[in-house]
Image: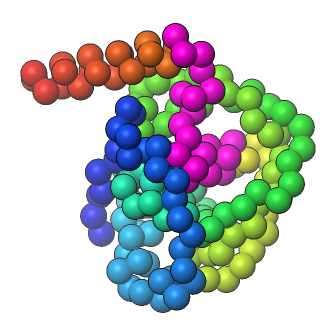
Amino acid sequence: MAQLPILEFPDPRLRTKAVPVEAARLADPSFQQLFDDMFETMYEAPGIGLAASQIDVHQRFMVIDVTEDKIRPLVFVNPEITARQGEQVYQEGCLSVPNIFADVTRSDMITVQALDRHGQPFTLEVDGVLAVCVQHEMDHLDGKLFVDYLSPLKREMVRKKLAKARKQANAA
């Protein structure tokens, strides 16, 4: 397994809209290895979700595990939200926007349909942190980041803060 580089805001590649995965690709061992590498990268970061777009693979799939002891790894291929209910405000962070957190309003409960890593279709009705994570990662697949929910002023402050942090890291 290998850890993968994660694109960071404001990298323009994060704005790319991902294309659907052809089901036949799921039989490819290298594609299966990519799922494993994404989980390793996400766990090491540490994070609870990682969309393919964040690792510069612009296809519609993502990995998620919101459990503390990392016992429920989920793969969503070509995910689609088919129903939404309610609203919740959740403080989100993002591996592509390191060390930045902000309140984002999202649907409280969603129904999501997708293929698993082996191409089997499934439907989940989820709420709480898993619902937030699914919506957050699906935004990535559409070229959207959680900072897009912030005011332009706050978004610019985030961009400057990350640029300063990168500059300090490079100087060290």
Residue 99 visible, this orientation: yes
> Residue 11 sits in which quadrant?
top left
Residue 155 forms part of the magenta stretch:
no
Rendered view: 143 above or below 82 = above
Residue 78 horizontal side relative to residue 131, left or right: left
Give the magenta-colored segment's residue range.
132-153
Return the residue found at the far right: 85
Residue 98 horizontal side relative to residue 59, left or right: left
Residue visible at 35% across and 16% down in the picture: 161
Residue 32: x and y in percent read 43, 78
Residue 73: x and y in percent read 56, 63
Rendered view: 40 above or below 99 = below
The answer to which of 44 and 56 lies nearer the viewer is: 56
> Residue 156 sits in which quadrant?
top left
Residue 31: x and y in percent read 41, 77
Residue visible at 38% across and 46% down in the picture: 13
Residue 157: x and y in percent read 43, 13
> Residue 77 sits in which quadrant?
bottom right
Residue 150 forms part of the magenta stretch:
yes
Colouring method of the image: rainbow
User: For the N terminus, which image quadrant?
Assistant: bottom left
Residue 46 visible, this orientation: no
Residue visible at 53% across and 65% down in the picture: 19
Rendered view: 19 above or below 64 = below
Residue visible at 82% across and 40% down in the picture: 108
User: For the C terminus, which image quadrant?
Assistant: top left
Main SS, magenta region, reads helix
